[in-house]
Amino acid sequence: MAFSELLDRVGSLGRFQVLQSMALVMPIMWVATQNILENFSAAVPGHRCWVPLLDNGTALAGTPSALRPEALLAVSIPPGPNHGPHQCRRFRQPQWQLLDTNSTATNWSEAATEPCVDGWVYDRSTFTSTIVDKWDLVCDSQALKPMAQSIFLAGVLVGTTVTGQASDRFGRRLVLTWSYLQVAVWVIEWTSAQARAMVMTFSNLGYSFGMILMATAAYGIRDWMWLQLVVSVPFFLFFVYSWWLPESARWLLTRGKVEQGLRELQRVAAINGKRAVGDALTTEVLLSAMQKELSVSQTPTNLGNLLCTPGLGLRTFVSTLCWFAFGFTFFGLALDLQALDSNIFLLQVLIGVIDMAAKIGTLLLLSCLGRRPMLAASLVLAGLCILANVLVPYEMRSLRSALALLGLGWIGGTFTCITIYSGELFPTVLRITAVGLGQMLARGGAILGPLVRLLGIHNPSLPLLLYGAVPVLSGLTVLLLPETRGLPLPDTIQDIQSQTVKKATHDTRGPSVLKSTQL
């Protein structure tokens, strides 16, 4: 008997799993708001140089009263690349000749301009305050905004690295109490193989709701400091109720903590209305049922096992590559909604809705098509949608927005696939480490994603080419992985090796069996 059979006895999809999923979806929603907060808290408002004629009351009083603000703006600030007032330069002295109707817009030289040495004036019609106008992250300092995004994601990378290792050593609940980065994998260890995809997708939908929640909160709160506070306070509540959540019995048993694993199984059985089944379980039953797993789990496991063990090295390489592609593409695009030149509140809601639809659709297709083809298709189609935007003129804003939303939708489907798939590719004793490594690569990609936008200074198409090419190439490598649909979660490294041997034997015997059948 394996752990999956023990789980079926106490209930693998009952009241406990519903309560657990609900308890974990809430923090996932608010984690999403943190990840995309800078779409709003770091939004770049319209801006121009501060100029005395317009912004100094004393200087303004000395100008002819017949001159309108538009005329004063024209003599104070040169036209920019988009034919509006330049955002980063101003005239050293008012160019009164530009008011002459016979004058042309080119009656000035670059030498007559200077940077915004006295600061900027910001348009506060959309946001009353952002970190951009707070610290003047514009013009020569505009690169600091993607750097700030990357620094935040680097902090998440450090957390992912530490918690992945700590969860395998100290347990899922203890680490979860201090960090919600490992929520997704923990959920599947209390569900059966048949319900695993559904439970995981439900958890992932929390991220979609979180994006809609972020847009709603930002629409109502236009000051970045208050917005930051509102999306951060709920984590105190999550910290309090996280102590109710049980430790993973699968992890406890494979670590030899049989008594504690028994208590957790009995607790789950009671919540699921199967108290009699739970009471019938004893340490002897558990030891007998998981004798093989318990003996093998005493073998030390570390990152080297993921990279060097036959059957695991390829899985580790491809899955981490897919995680990287997800983080690189998603955060590169999703944290730059202003580039689409549309209503960012509406765009954020649409991304959440499309992401939700993509994840539900992916769940349905996973059951029919399997994990491998769905992950490959999601990555490739996401990349193709992004690459198509390279060919679309900037004037066709609606089409560019539609292609970007489709690309992000497929990336959302990718997240569902890779979360479920990577959890099924690795044994219990290494699962959190493997997924932690994958998330580390995802955060590494997320760190690079915003920085790649700086290449647009040299060629506006370069960022899109990279955002599109990486998922396409990653999707093709997925075809090297085995299919895991409907298989029980492997508990040990030996289970993975057995699966590899069985597949190799099946592939070797397949043609001869087919030939003998035809004869």
Image (tube, helix red, strand yellow):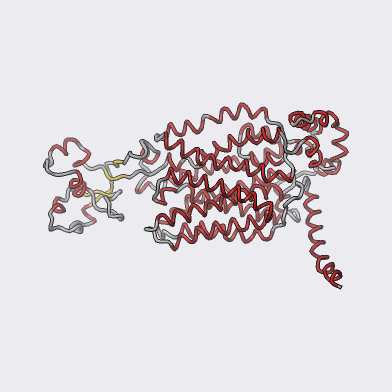
Dividing the picture into quadrants, the one containing residue 378 is: bottom right
Question: Where, quadrant-wise, is the N terminus in this rendering?
Answer: top right
Q: Nearer the viewer, residue 319 or 300?
A: 319
Q: Nearer the viewer, residue 109 or 85?
A: 85
Residue lying at the far top of the rendered structure? 240
The residue drawn where x is 42% and y is 34% is: 220
Dividing the picture into quadrants, the one containing residue 325 is: bottom right
Question: Left or right: 306 with respect to 159?
Answer: right
Place of residue 252 in the rendered image (x, y in percent of width and height, measured from the top left) = 76, 36
Question: Where, quadrant-wise, is the C terminus in this rendering?
Answer: bottom right
Place of residue 334 in the rendered image (x, y in percent of width and height, measured from the top left) = 49, 48
- From what the image shows, is residue 478 above or below residue 251? below
The residue drawn where x is 74% and y is 50% is: 486
The residue drawn where x is 56% and y is 28% is: 236
Question: Left or right: 181 with respect to 291?
Answer: left
- From what the image shows, is residue 429 above or below residue 270? below
Question: Left or right: 358 with respect to 512?
Answer: left
Place of residue 318 in the rendered image (x, y in percent of width and height, measured from the top left) = 65, 56
Place of residue 212 in the rendered image (x, y in percent of width and height, measured from the top left) = 50, 40
